[in-house]
Structures are given as C-alpha cells and as structure tokens.
Amino acid sequence: QPFEFGNGSNAESWQNPSGAIYTDTFRDDRPQFTGMIAYDTNWHMWTITQTPGANGYKIYNDGINHFNGTGESIVNTGVREDKWNICRSKDGGAGYFYYSGDIDEMGIWNRSLTQAEVTQLYNGGAGLNYGVISLVLDLLSPDDAVTISTTSNNFLINVTDNGAGLNNVSILINGTINQTNSSGMIGLYNFSVNNLLEGFHNWSAEAYDGSDSLVESSVRTFTIDTTFPEINISYPVNGQNFPYLVNLNNITLNTTITGTNLDTCWYLYNGTNTTFSCSSGVLVSKNLTLTNQSIVTVYANNSAGNLNNSISDWTFDIFNFNDYTYDPNITESSSTTFIGNFQTGTSISSAFLEYNNTNNSASIGSLGGNRYTLSYTVISPAVGSDTNITWFFWINNVNTTSFNQTVLNINLDNCGSYSNIIAYYY
C-alpha cells in the first residue's frame, strides 16, 4: 500500500493490491472501486483528501477525482507503533504487505486540497514543485478558442489565495508579459489589452506569491478577426431596369459571399428574412417571388460578429399586379368590359386595350404612387362558331400579358337543326 498514518479507531490507510484502489477506513468498511491502472510502468499521481461530511473523502488519480466517500469528523494523526508507515501495511499480524513500485515527491498537507489545486499539482503530468500551494489563477474571459472582432479587449482573471499572500499578477499574450498589476489584491483582475494584431493568439496569467514563488495559469487561445465578409450581387444588378414585371413571378437572386469564418447568410425581400447556406467564394442562386417591392438586401456575418450587407435596387417600366376583371366567356355581339391594375416607373403617357387585333384607347384611373386602373368596354364580334379572342393592355408602348376571351356563337335556325321540339298530346 502507498502509505498510512494515524492510530486507534480513527486510523486510515489507502491500499493498492493488484492494480485496484480501495479504502480501509474508520469502521472497517472497504468499498472497492476499480478502473484506475496502477501497475502499467508509468508514473501516476495519487491524491487523497479528507473533509467531514458527504463526499468529503476523495481519491484522485492524475488529477481526476475517481471516488467520493463520507468524510469523518475526526482524523487522529498520532504515531502508530511509534513510526510512520509509508509503503507498508499497518497490520503485521499475517505479515506486512509492501508496495511494489517507486514513489517520488510525496507531500502531506494539514488541510484538504481543492480540485483546482490537485489539477495544478498534476500539471498535465509534468508535475509541480508543490511546497505550500498559495495561489490559484482562474482565467474567466474571454473563453478558450473564441474569435473576436475588436483589437482592444478585456481579459478577466480571478486570483484565490490560501495564505501566502500575493506580490503581483501579470497577463501574458503569446507567452510575453503584456501588463503587470502589483496591487497585491486578491480577487478579480481586469486587464485591458490594446492593439492586438489580426490572427491567432494565446493568453495566460502568472503571479508571484508572498514567498516570491511563481504560479502559472492554464493557456487559452483566441483569434482576432476584424475583416467583414464581402458580398457581391451579380443579379439583379443594382440599378438594373426591367421593362416588364408580373406579380408573383420569379426572378433569380445570384450572390457570392467571400470571407473567413462565415457564420450566417440571409436576404431580406418584401419584409421577409430568408436564411441560406453560404461558403466563401461560392455562387448562390435563390428565387425571389416578385411583388412591386424593388429592393433586396443580402446580409452575411462571421463568427467574430462582423456583419456586412449589400443592396440591389432595381426599377421597372411596367409592373403588372396580375389583377384583372373580365368575362372569360361572352356571347357574340355583347357588351364586355376589361379592367386591369398596373404600376409604372413614370406617369402613364398612353394606354390602350388591344382586342381582336384592334387598339382602343383605355380609361385611366389613378390610385396614387404611379398605380393605375385601366378599363375599356367593347362589343364582342359576331362569330360563326365559338371563337377565342385575344386581348391585352398596351401601356407606354409596352404590351402586357395577353389573355383569351371565348366569344360564343348564337345559333339561329328554322326550328330544326339547333332546336329541341316538345310536343304535347291531349
């Protein structure tokens, strides 16, 4: 077994037979737990701490807490058999058992170490001159492996002292001391670091305690990224003019976004944000369902929070709301009215209804904002059979979408070919 100390009813020992660790505590209960390899020809650090109460009895291997038991309220440290037993069992009745292995750098404290102190002692397997552990440096902010969008940032460090005092605390950027605070204050330190360069960095802290012993923190990394994503909208091009657009038809939005650490990309059109996947330098095509709104804004940010946007604002000569009132079927030689709603880029200079290859000057009703209602009433032609008649509006010399109206033939005969004769017999 590694060691044992104490005597009488409050004796403790930590035994290590066959690669397992188990306890022989105050009431002879022996809860065994396995899984920590001891006999593997490598060095390991075993740490045992005791405080009264639930989970107060702890066993660590290589800085990791593997077992928690109830801690006793009293631990006697008087000498058993007038000596300390290190690497030998306490009970020699059946012969003493000896620990088979090497032991180095044993330390005994008059208090229980914290998890942070045990981790600091293990030091990733490199070990540490333990002495009196006096200071613990906790890096609080920024988090590890973050990307930051500013070259001036605050670094928060908390210092805990266990009795040896504090001379100074320093922050290190890329392994070099950037600033030192010699106030000797225990608690939170806020270092403001300016003029950080673009790219990858690491930061850490170190402190000297009252005995001038050096304590070092863990190391964190961060990346400075002040570059905004670049956005190119190749279609529709900003300022582009469309002669004729129709409500709810589609046009294709083509955009390419370039940047490092891209996070989220989206576009805003007609009051709706739509997110899309983006990779640096890769063309993305998305369908826009048209309204009379003529601005689309593309946004992109990166993991550092750098947000950029680009706008495409187009114009049109005629916008067709695709809102018509007309008779799809009408009998020949009947009055029929056609109504349509439109918006123009400028005011209307001319408007016609072309019906059956004949232009007719349409009535123009203004709705404000270059929006108009056009209407015209015609007499359907006489036809020898049901016939489709094409019609559409002309506005400022732009022809809009064409439609068909079916003109129905009225069949007149001599009460023979096209008539049903009903005879009544009395």
Image (tube, grey):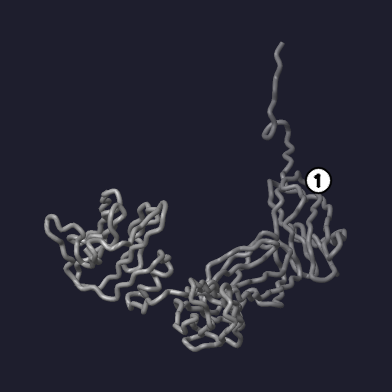
Q: Where is residue 329 in the image (x, y as percent from the top left)?
A: 72, 45
Closer to the camera, 333 or 44?
44
For the point 54% across and 75% down, the residue is: 157
Give left or right: position of 381 versus 106. Answer: right
Relative vertical location of residue 315 with respect to residue 210 in this rendering, above or below: above
Give left or right: position of 269 versus 71. Answer: right
Q: Can residue 272 be seen in this view?
A: yes
Q: What residue type is labelled 1?
A: Ser
Which residue matches tag 1?
334
Instruction: Check the image and name the residue furthest to the left.
Output: 95
Q: Residues within 10 Å of mark 1 (few under 14, many from 20)?
A: few
Q: Where is residue 313 in the image (x, y as percent from the top left)?
A: 71, 73
Classify the position of the C terminus by image quarter: top right
Relative vertical location of residue 16 with respect to residue 193 in this rendering, above or below: above
Instruction: Check the image and name the residue furthest to the front.
Output: 82
Question: To which quarter of the image does residue 341 belong?
Answer: bottom right
Give left or right: position of 310 versus 282. Answer: right
Question: To which quarter of the image does residue 112 belong?
Answer: bottom left
Question: To which quarter of the image does residue 400 belong?
Answer: bottom right
Number of numbered discs visible in the structure rendering: 1
Q: What element carries label 1?
A: loop
For the point 16% across and 68% down, the residue is: 100
Q: Position of residue 283 (x, y in %)?
A: 53, 75
Relative vertical location of residue 151 with respect to residue 328 in this rendering, above or below: below
Q: Can residue 228 be seen in this view?
A: no
Classify the position of the N terminus by image quarter: bottom left
Closer to the camera, 168 or 335?
168
Closer to the camera, 347 or 224?
224
Q: Position of residue 220 (x, y in %)?
A: 47, 77
